[in-house]
Amino acid sequence: MSDDLVPLRCPLCAGTLAAASSGERTLTCPTGHRYDAAKQGYFNLLTGRGTSFREDTAAMVQARASFLAAGHYEPLADALAQEALTGFPDRVPRLLDAGAGTGYYLDAVASALAGSRGQRPPALALDISRYAMRRAARLPRTRALVWDLWRPLPVADAGVDLLLNVFAPRNGKEFARVIAPGGLALVATPLPGHLAEATVPLGLLGIAAGKDESVAAAVGPEFEAVHTREIRSSLELSTDDAVRLATMGPAGHHHDDASTRSRLQTHPMPARVTAAFRLQVFRRR
Ligand SMILES: C[S@@+](CC[C@H](N)C(=O)[O-])C[C@H]1O[C@@H](n2cnc3c(N)ncnc32)[C@H](O)[C@@H]1O
Ligand SMILES: [Zn+2]
């Protein structure tokens, strides 16, 4: 099974990292570095290194999974799937989701490709949150690795064809190394106005809406900008949805459900909330 997955690189020695002959639950390199799967199926490649990053908690990841499962951001998932289908008309690209979270968008893209090509692509999910990787590890033909995107990625040179990066850090230099020439990077960021009506009622932290050019600068000169789309929708949120929205983002580190609910009594949510995303498509030169 391992041979047709996304090719990995050992974070310690840069040798080929692959399933051990003893089975899929151990990854090993020719030098003998070994990584065992957690019981939920993901691999924590950061073991022993530590990181100062504050990972999304179980409650934050649960809130994100429920919010996304309700379909509120489906227009963005559909747009990503569409770009994957048109970008690779005659083959099944190997996928990498950098900052995959629960794997919602990765699954949407992989399922669309499977539906249209009859073959599900091999996929790799990277995220610093163990709770997110527990969920992503459940997807078919997918490996989920706990990793810090600011470090050299545990992926072979030119090992993937299509990279997804949805509201997550962009390490352009490493993205250029791991995407094969001619491959694509799909980068989604919030537009100004995204969730604007919910900011005060939910006590959300300011949403950093980057400019087109700043994303292009982050991905760097090895990518050519192909096109940009804007995806807007109007969300009707129940109180439970609103509480999940508050919990799933960075504000989730500071608020609990009870405090969000009591805040909503004095700062009611409007009937509709704007969702606005920018999706930029880049080609690896
Ligand atoms: C706003 S969430 C988006 C997750 C997913 N793409 C989605 O839209 O559902 C940002 C994600 O980036 C991850 N993240 C943040 N900094 C990271 C880093 N340095 N390395 C790896 N993942 C990181 C977080 O754990 C979180 O899952
Ligand atoms: Zn090694």
Image (cartoon, helix red, strand yellow):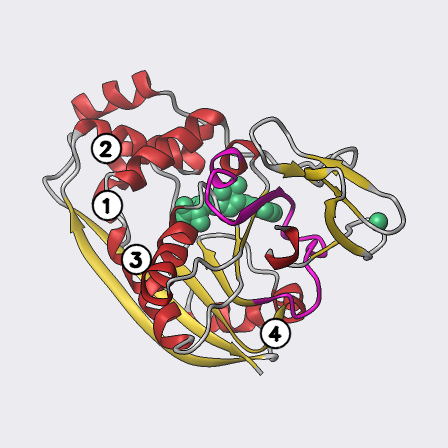
Q: Residue at x 24, y 57 (%)?
A: 75
Q: Quadrant of residue 48?
A: top right
Q: Residue at x 39, y 40 (%)?
A: 205
Camera-nearest residue between 243 and 153: 153
Instruction: Kindly report the distance in space between the C-alpha atoms of the residues bearing marks 4 and 1.
Output: 32 Å
Q: How many marks?
A: 4
Instruction: Kindly report the distance in space between the C-alpha atoms of the residues bearing marks 4 and 3.
Output: 25 Å
- Looking at the rendered structure, the secondary structure element under dot 2 is helix
Q: Residue at x 60, y 26 (%)?
A: 39
Q: Which mark is residue 241?
A: 2
Range of residues picked out in magenta: 134-160
Residue 151 % position (x, y): 71, 53
- Looking at the rendered structure, the secondary structure element under dot 4 is strand
Q: Is residue 4 magenta?
A: no
Q: Give the residue type that dot 2 points to.
A: Asp
The reply to whether callout 1 and callout 2 are in contact (CB within 8 Å) is yes
Pointer 4 or 1: first along the chain: 1
Q: Residue at x 30, y 57 (%)?
A: 76
- Provide the residue designation for mark 1: 72
Q: Which mark is residue 122?
A: none
- Looking at the rendered structure, the secondary structure element under dot 1 is loop
Q: Quadrant of residue 120?
A: bottom left
User: Would the CB of label 1 be found within 8 Å of ligand 1?
Assistant: no
Residue 59 % position (x, y): 43, 25
Task: Tell me: residue 219, above or below residue 109.
Answer: below
